[in-house]
Amino acid sequence: MKLMSVVMLSLVSSVGVATFTAQAHSLEINRIHEMPNEFASFHSVAQNKREIAQALANEYLNMGDALQYQINEYQLSIDLDELAGISLSTQSNINQHNIQIKQLKGISSHQKNSEQSIIKLRLADESMLARLHAGEAPLFSYASGDEEEGNVEAFDTDGGIQYLDAYRLPTQPVFIVELDKAETMKEGIKAMNEVFDSADKEVVNLLLNQPFFVAPEPMSMTVIKNIKLKDIKESWISGPAEVYAIISGVSAASAELTPKIEVVELPYLDHAKKEYTPNQIIVQWDHYRWQAVDILLMESDDNMNYKVLATALLDVATQVLQLIPEAGTQSAAVITRLTNAIIQAMPDSWTTNEDDYLDVFYTILENQTYSEYHGASDNAKITLEPLVIQPRH
C-alpha cells in the first residue's frame, strides 16, 4: 500500500509560522531518509518465518498425521508450541526463532512468560480441509512483504520451492507461518505507550505530589459508535487485519508545547466493507492541553519494532513542536502539523508489509458529535460521540 499524500488543512500566515513550515519540511525529509537504516534489520522477521516454514515442510512426514488431527473446522490454527510430532531439534530451532522475533518486535520484556510462543501455524482457508484430510500434501508458506509483486513463496514436502498467486487462493492446502497478531499488537501497544508515557513525567510527578483526598471530577471522553473501512489491501496469506489508532495532540502536562501521543487498539476492526459498533473510548480529553486531537488509523503487520516506532514518532513530534512559536499559534494548526509530521516521517517501507497507513481524521474536537464522518483519504468512515463519566460519590 503506497502512502497516501495528505493535504495541509490549516494555514497560518504569520512570518513565524512560515519559517516553521520551511524548517519542519526540511526536518521531515531528513527524518525519512534516516529511518530506513534504523529499521533495515526488521526484515529478518520474515526471514525467521521463512526458516520455520521450510523446517516444517521438511518435517511433514513425521508430523502430518498429528497436524491433520489438530486442524479442523473448529480450529484452523495452532500455536507452534502445541504442534505435535516434530523433532526436538526442530522444536529447539523454532524456540530460538520465537525469541528473536520478540526482540525484533520490541516486546521481549512485556510478556509474562518470555518463552511463550507468538508464532502460529494456520491453514489458509477452511475450503482446504477436505483435501488435507484426504491426504494431499500441503505447502508451507509465510507473509514476506513482497506480496504486492504478486508472488508468495511456499515450500513443498519434497524440499522444493513453489510460487503462488498472492491474490488468488490456492486449492492445494497451504499452511501459513505467522505471528499471533492479537497477542503481538497487545504487547506492542503496551511498549509504545510506555515510551509515550515516559515523556509525560510532569504528569506523574503531579499525581504523586497530590494529597490523597482529591475531589473526583467528571471525565470527558469521546467514543466510537461505529466505524467502517473501504479497503484493507491484504493478500490471502496475511489473514485478518489488526488495526490501531494513534491519537496525537499537545500534552496537558507541560507549560511548553510538548506532544501527547497515545495508541489505542481496535481489535475488532479486521475486515473492510463491514460496519462495527464498538462503543469504544478513543480519546480521554484530560490528557490533552487543547480541545482538539487528530486520529490516525494504522494497520499492524510484522516487520516493525514497537519500541523503536514509538521513540521515532515521539522524537519527530517533539522536534516539530519545538519549531512552533507558541504566541498567537492556532491550536488546530499546530495539531495538524504534528500529525502530518508523523505521517511524513514514516518510511515508504512501512507501507508495504509493515504498518500500513489507512486514514486520518483531522481536528476532532471535544464535546462534538461526528456522524458518518469521512477521513481525509476517504478510506474510513466513523461516528464519534462525546461521553462524560461521572465520579462515584
Image (cartoon, grey):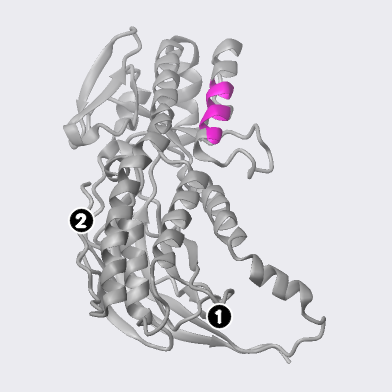
Is 247 left, or right, of 256 in this rendering? left
Identify the image quadrant of residue 348.
top left
Residue 118 at x, y = what percent?
54, 36
Residue 392 at x, y = what percent?
70, 88
Going by the numbered disc 1, the residue's amino acid type is Asp
Please say if 183 is above or below 23: above
Q: Which residues are magenta?
A: 94-103
Q: Does residue 226 appear anywhere in the picture? A: no
| Residue sitting at the far top | 158
The residue that appears at 47% across and 74% down in the rendered structure is 283
Residue 299 at x, y = what percent?
35, 52
The residue that appears at 24% across and 17% down in the rendered structure is 162
- Which of the labelled discs sits on residue 176, or is there none? none
Residue 46 at x, y = what percent?
39, 28
* Magenta stretch encompasses residue 97: yes
Mark 2 lies on residue: 4
* Element carrying mark 2: loop
Front residue (pair 58, 134): 58
Going by the numbered disc 2, the residue's amino acid type is Met
**Mark 2 packing: few (<14 Cα in 10 Å), some, or many (20+)?**
some
Kindly report the secondary structure that dominates the magenta region of the rendered protein. Answer: helix
Mark 1 lies on residue: 286
* Element carrying mark 1: helix
Is 344 left, or right, of 213 in this rendering? left
